Amino acid sequence: MFAKRKMIMDIYFRDGSGSRVGFIIGTDIKDNSGSRVGYIEGDNIKDNSGSRIGYIEGNNFKDNYGKRVGYIESNNIKDTYGTRIGYPENNASNIEMCAAALLLFGLEAAPQTTHSSPPRPETGWEWFVFILSYFLKPFFELSYLKKYTATRGNYWRTLFCTYVYYLVGGMIIAQSVKSTVGVIISIIVILILSLPIVFVSIRRMHDIGKSGWWNFIPIVGFFMCGFFPRKIENNPYF
């Protein structure tokens, strides 16, 4: 009698635009040309030289140093920003999707940014520029909403700057509310000056793994933004 042979099916993967990028057969990960680029060993993903390049932990993909580089959501492979980078054509296990993410899509940890301290201002002009840039920085960070979270330090700095904005805006409003046009200008000024604290509050909520909608509960939102620590593990916003 012949022993039954278990059929191993190829699992093809496509990128976000729908183009095939490679496949997995058994424990081997191959590119579109059929060349093996690595393999699966337990919960680890290794390249052809046998070096571990990452592993699976729950629904998260991590690099060899334990930094989360992406995750699985339903049948989609996503990076830390939530962008879908690919998906399998047929059913695939978590470890197979992790292997595809790390080797076929080249998912890597975002580089760590180092922040060097700026040189200390010396002249009066340098101090003026330094102070001006400090108070204008929250406005420059409005574009950070989709890509970056905010630390507690970012939040408190923006809160302080916003307080100063309101003091300055209050003087403008006091001189302009004497007419209908002045009232309209005052409303516009208040809305513009409020933008930094609105945006940084949303980013701070993302930093602790919560939706920005929590800020609609004023006291609770302030307490969470100001005092809750950063959440790294299982944070969908990283």
Image: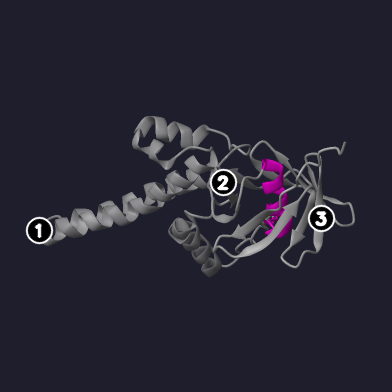
What residue is drawn where x is 78% and y is 39%?
A: 43
Of the image marks 3 and 1, the number of the one nearer the N terminus: 3
Of the image marks 3 and 2, the number of the one nearer the N terminus: 3
Residue lying farthest to the right in this orientation: 49
Q: Characterize the local packing of mark 3: few (<14), some (14-19) or many (20 or more) Cα atoms within 10 angstroms.
A: many
Please tell me how many numbered marks the rendered image carries.
3
- What is the magenta range? 93-111
What residue is drawn where x is 65% and y is 45%?
A: 92
Residue 189: give x, y in percent of width and height.
Answer: 27, 57
103 within the magenta span: yes
> Which disc, if any, is residue 102?
none
Asked which secondary structure carries label 2, the reply is loop
Residue position for label 3? 38
Q: Nearer the viewer, mark 3 or mark 1?
A: 3
Q: Would you say 201 lies left or right of 147 here?
A: left
Residue position for label 1? 180
What residue is drawn where x is 42% and y is 42%?
A: 212
Front-most of 106 and 147?
106
Q: Nearer the viewer, mark 1 or mark 2?
A: 2
Q: Characterize the local packing of mark 1: few (<14), some (14-19) or many (20 or more) Cα atoms within 10 angstroms.
A: few
Residue position for label 2? 75
Residue 11: give x, y in percent of width and height.
Answer: 68, 52
Q: Quadrant of the N terminus?
A: top right
Q: Amino acid at mark 2?
A: Asn
Residue 73 visible in the current orientation: yes
| Distance between the alpha carbons at the discs numbered 1 and 2 | 56 Å
Asked which secondary structure carries label 1, the reply is helix
Q: Amino acid at mark 3?
A: Gly
